[in-house]
Image: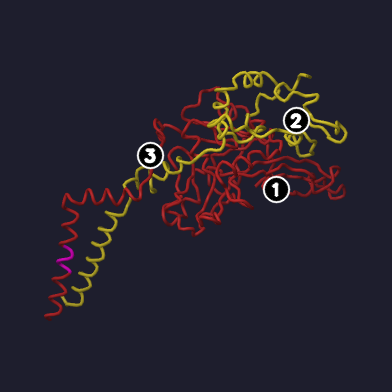
């Protein structure tokens, strides 16, 4: 074999061996566990703090309110839709969720031509402008008057 | 010639050393230690990804455009401020056609002020000129054949076995190929971390038995979330498929989205 060819072969073999060594040590153990990706990435993505506690967490202490809500027109609403992200409140009940005001109701119920027709809507300036919605409506029991 | 021989023997020695390293039992702890640096925490206890197939469905007939989903997503996933959204709500307005034109439908206007966060107020055209208008929540279409995964050069974008299309932020090199590849515009480059980011179906929540944040706050159950492997027949996700005429976005691209919509017009892309 001509020496230059031999040298090239040895060089190629050296490159292949060093690649194999690097790959052996550097490929994460979980690579290929589920497919062509690092399996432990899923665990890392799952390890993330929450800001929304979820309805189950609300139910632990506020079962009465959740039950009341479930029987009325607002039954599809999640607690944190109106009351805001409450994981910190679930962790420490001394941290109170934000106080609600006018805009919470209007956000969904202000008339808008893009909203579906089945949804109850009002033109606020023709409806009531003096005070709060809760003077006449109970958010947890929307069909009943106070 | 002598020089050649010494080089040859040196290379042979190198090869022998490499083979020796691979063979010796000493490699196991060294390898484990190297990989420990690269590996992270485990999945939550009792969660086996092969036992689930998560899916989302959107009933646009029920969307009232409150924008709570877009806001909740931003808060839950610490999405950077500005025009970066993992989910957003679009408003479609189809105007009345010019009576002389003989057309059934007018122009299509689409807008999405601030991703729909804070809701939608004034319409861009007067109410009398609107023929039809509706809201369409948008998010990752959970493609069966995800173009974003196919183009990733480093194996950072992947289809997880439980149905989410995810990004490994440690492997992502920020090349942006996936952002160009997604036909639904569901990915963006995080300006702080410089890696691609997208909807994870709130992976940290669904692996703990919670719903994604957008589903949690949706007041009208426009977003329906479920597990195709474990859902009983009366589960909302099964009911959604049973009771609606559904469609996927851009079906001609062959991405086979697993996110289905009910109640959208042909104008929706």
Instruction: Choose top left, top right, bottom left or bottom right for residue B105.
Output: top right
Q: Earlier in the sequence, mark 3 or mark 1?
A: 3
The residue to which callout 3 is attached is B42
Q: Chain of mark 2?
A: A
Residue B63 position, x and y percent, is: 69, 35
Q: Colour of chain A?
A: yellow
B105 sits to left or right of B60 = right
Find residue B112 and name its label: 1
Residue B62 position, x and y percent, is: 69, 33
> In the figure, B147 relative to A81: above or below?
below
Residue B5 position, x and y percent, is: 12, 76
Q: Does residue B14 belong to the magenta stretch?
A: yes
The majority secondary structure of the magenta stretch comes to helix
Q: CA distance from mark 1 to mark 2?
A: 21 Å
The residue closer to the viewer here, B256 or A56, is A56
The residue to which callout 2 is attached is A119
Q: CA distance from mark 2 to mark 3?
A: 44 Å
State which chain is coloured red.
Answer: B
> Badge 3: few (under 14), some or many (20 or more) residues near its Cα, within 10 Å?
some
Callout 1–callout 2 Cβ contact below 8 Å: no
Q: Which residues are magenta?
A: B11-15
> Badge 2: few (under 14), some or many (20 or more) residues near its Cα, within 10 Å?
some
Find residue B102 and name its label: none
B162 sits to left or right of B101 = left
A28 sits to left or right of B141 = left
């Amino acid at each position: 074999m001509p020496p230059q060819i031999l040298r090239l072969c040895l060089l190629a073999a050296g490159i292949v061996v060093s690649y194999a060594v690097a790959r052996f040590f550097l490929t994460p153990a979980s690579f290929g566990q589920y497919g062509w990706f690092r399996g432990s990435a899923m665990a890392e993505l799952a390890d993330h703090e929450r800001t929304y506690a979820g309805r189950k967490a609300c139910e632990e202490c506020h079962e009465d309110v959740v039950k009341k809500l479930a029987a009325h027109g607002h039954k599809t609403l999640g607690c944190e839709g109106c009351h805001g992200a409450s994981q910190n409140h679930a962790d420490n009940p001394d941290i109170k969720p934000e106080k609600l005001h006018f805009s919470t109701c209007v956000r969904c119920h202000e008339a808008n031509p893009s909203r579906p027709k089945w949804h109850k809507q009002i033109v606020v300036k023709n409806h009531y402008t003096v005070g709060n919605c809760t003077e006449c409506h109970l958010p947890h029991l929307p069909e009943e008057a106070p | 010639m002598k020089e050649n021989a010494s080089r040859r023997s040196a290379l042979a020695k190198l090869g022998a050393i490499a083979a020796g390293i691979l063979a010796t039992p000493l490699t196991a702890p060294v390898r484990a230690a190297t990989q420990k640096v690269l590996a992270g925490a485990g999945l939550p206890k009792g969660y086996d990804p092969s036992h689930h197939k998560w899916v989302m469905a959107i009933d646009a007939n029920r969307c009232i455009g409150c924008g709570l989903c877009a806001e909740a997503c931003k808060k839950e996933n610490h999405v950077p401020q500005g025009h970066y959204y993992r989910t957003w709500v679009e408003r479609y307005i189809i105007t009345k056609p010019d009576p002389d034109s003989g057309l059934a439908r007018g122009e299509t206007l689409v807008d999405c002020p601030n991703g729909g966060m804070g809701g939608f107020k004034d319409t861009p055209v007067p109410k009398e000129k609107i023929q039809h208008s509706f809201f369409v929540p948008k998010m990752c279409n959970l493609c069966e054949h995800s173009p974003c995964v196919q183009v990733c050069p480093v194996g950072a974008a992947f289809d997880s076995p439980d149905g989410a299309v995810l990004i490994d932020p440690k492997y992502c090199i920020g090349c942006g190929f996936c952002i160009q590849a997604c036909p639904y515009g569901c990915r963006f480059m995080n300006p702080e971390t410089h890696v691609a980011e997208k909807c994870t179906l709130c992976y940290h929540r669904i692996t703990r038995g919670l719903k994604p944040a957008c589903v949690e706050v949706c007041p009208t159950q426009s977003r329906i979330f479920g597990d195709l492997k474990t859902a009983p027949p009366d589960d909302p996700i099964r009911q959604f498929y049973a009771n609606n005429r559904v469609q996927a976005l851009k079906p001609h691209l062959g991405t086979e989205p697993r996110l289905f919509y009910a109640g959208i017009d042909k104008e929706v892309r």
